[in-house]
Amino acid sequence: MEYDRARLKRDVKLSMKRSGCMMVTLLFTVVVSAGAWLINTVLGWLTPGDLGLSTMISFQLQAGRELEEAVEQAILKLLSLGPGPLVSVITVGMVTSILVALWQSAMNVGYKGWCLGMVRSENPPIGKIFAALPRIGAVLVTRFLTGLFELLWSLLVGLGYIVAVVVIAVIGTATELVGLTIVLLLAAFVGFVLAAIWVTMRYALVDYVLLDKGLSGMDAIRESKRLMKGNIGRGWVLQVSFFGWYLLMIVIVYAGIMVALMAMVSQFSASSTGGLIAASGFALVLIAVVVIAATVLQLWLQPYTTGAMARFYDWTNGRLDGLHSGPGFGGPGGWGGPTDYTWNSGSSGPGTGSGSGGGLPPPPPKPPRDDPWN
């Protein structure tokens, strides 16, 4: 099957229109945030109130100290209590961070599963975002192994880059060829970037394999590497193609903040109380509008990018194995019916004339255009 990134993204947007994806994404965000807050609150009870670092900092701030001094005094106070309280605070903090990361990781896998059902036009229920929880053990083991391999490969790539830079620096010092040294350094940097992309992308489909085929651990990792073989460049370009949308979001936020600050500063210099109040109100309204606009864009962009990778998974799966879906978490039927997508961007063949005497065949439809933001 021919790969067509523009058609892939267009089909994802068509799937989004009838799925209620923005409300699902909002619910997903609220659930993840609420779960993280609950974990922090419950485990916070295990630390006595007077031993919490944040509590100590609050006391120092109430005493009239600056933030930097308050943090310093709180840390010194905590250290002065001896190793027992310090170990308790550190342990509770580490456990809290680990549990929050595991919760977020499991929910992210479930959200990807919902997006996989969305791009397959299955109209998945909202409860699909919790699909990873029944197999939380397999999900966490798979995510842990994936993160471990990415870390080890990243360390190896980083070490290789450092060695290459040192060798190039030694060669440049010995030969005094500045131009050659610069070229070699650029080549080493390009090699480092390409290696980093390779490390990241070969595991990009692990979560979809985990959900769709019921594989876990090393089996899911091997299947992701198999599907990404020869497709790393396509997958990376697909992810980078959303750069313009994220840039637009950044521009909206920073432009809104800058306009609000400029309005405030202009009234400060004018020394007008009424103008300052009006400028403050305008700044607050503008910041609220910016926050709402950025939030809406993010709620639309998250299912768009996740759904694009889900559709990319279906393409790699169908190209290598034929058109089918795996067993998944939902039983023998998997996440839905066959992934029988058509990836050709042109017409299926020449048409026939119409009317008396025959006519020219209709022109082939134009291929879909990609987003203007890449």
Image: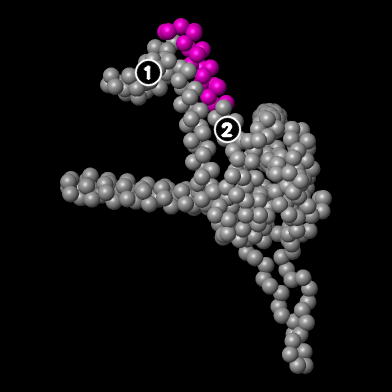
Q: Is residue 66 above or below residue 259?
A: above
Magenta stretch: dominant SS?
helix
Q: Is residue 356 above or below residue 219?
A: below
Q: Quadrant of the N terminus?
A: bottom right
On whether residue 275 falls in the magenta region, the answer is no
Q: Position of residue 247 (x, y in %)?
A: 51, 50
Q: Is residue 99 above or below residue 125?
A: above
Q: Position of residue 67 (x, y in %)?
A: 35, 24
Q: Pointer 2: what residue?
A: 103
The mark that comes first in sequence, 2 or 1, is 1
Q: Which residues are magenta?
A: 80-98
In the image, which is nearer the foreground, mark 2 or mark 1?
Answer: 2
Q: Residue at x 73, y 44 (%)?
A: 331
Q: Pointer 1: what residue?
A: 56
239 with respect to 94 (left or right)? right
Q: Position of residue 240 (x, y in %)?
A: 62, 49
On whether residue 97 falls in the magenta region, the answer is yes
The Cα atoms of the two marked residues, 2 and 1, are separated by 28 Å
Q: Residue at x 38, y 52 (%)?
A: 289
Count neighbours of disc 2 (C-alpha within 10 A) and say few if under 14, some if 14 to 19, many if 20 or more.
some
Q: In the image as oriented, which residue stretches furthest toward the bottom?
A: 356
Residue type at mark 1 is Met
99 with respect to 215 (left or right)? left
Looking at the rendering, which quadrant does residue 212 occupy?
A: top right
